[in-house]
Image (cartoon, rainbow, N blue to C red):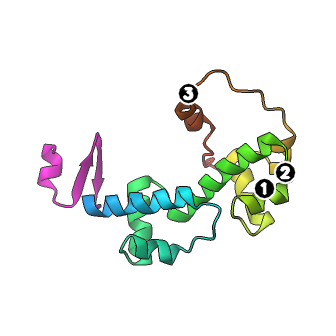
Amino acid sequence: MGKAARDDPGSVSVGCAKLVGVSLEDLRRLRRVRDRMDREYAEPLDMSELARGALMSPGHFQRSFRKAFGETPYSYLMTRRIERAKALLRQGDLTVTEVCLAVGCTSLGSFSSRFTELVGRTPSAYRAASHEPAAVIPSCVARTFTRPRRRPY
């Protein structure tokens, strides 16, 4: 453990990162919840239930999740859903409404708004665009560059 982490009892060193205010045990529980969100993104997930899974109150869960991963649990879940929606839209087999429901969203309007916010174009425009097969790029690299990102206003 680095000197700064030893001096600050509320910090945890993780590789090069230093998470202030997140204990190692909390980080483990948050990772388990994040892994569950990755597996069950298409299911209706209740944030209070996820917080209970991390043994935290909903408010503490939200603050700790943001501190550990840089975004709120809901934002992380929606980003994961949009990633999957992009893949389904590229295939072109499903309508936008079917994709919306397949990734766990219940409101087409909210799905379209969030998709447009993160991707920069509507789901219909994204589906209609040509998507060339990716060159031989490792999937971990491709995932990093195709992950939806919030656009600053």
Residue that numbered label 1 is attached to:
99
| Residue depicted at 44% across the width and 76% down the height | 58
Residue 132 position in % (x across, y down): 77, 27
Residue that numbered label 3 is attached to:
138
Q: Which image quadrant: the N terminus?
A: top left
Q: Which type of secondary structure does the marked residue at label 1 adopt?
A: helix
Identity, as a three-letter code, of the amino acid under mark 1: Val
Residue 112 position in % (x across, y down): 77, 58
Residue contact between numbered discs 1 and 2, judged by CB atoms under 8 Å: yes
Residue 68 position in % (x across, y down): 38, 56
| Relative vertical location of residue 133 with respect to residue 112 in this rendering, above or below | above
Residue that numbered label 2 is attached to:
94
Which residues fall within the magenta stretch? 1-22
Residue contact between numbered discs 1 and 3, judged by CB atoms under 8 Å: no
| Residue depicted at 59% across the width and 24% down the height | 137
CA gap, disc 3 and disc 2: 26 Å
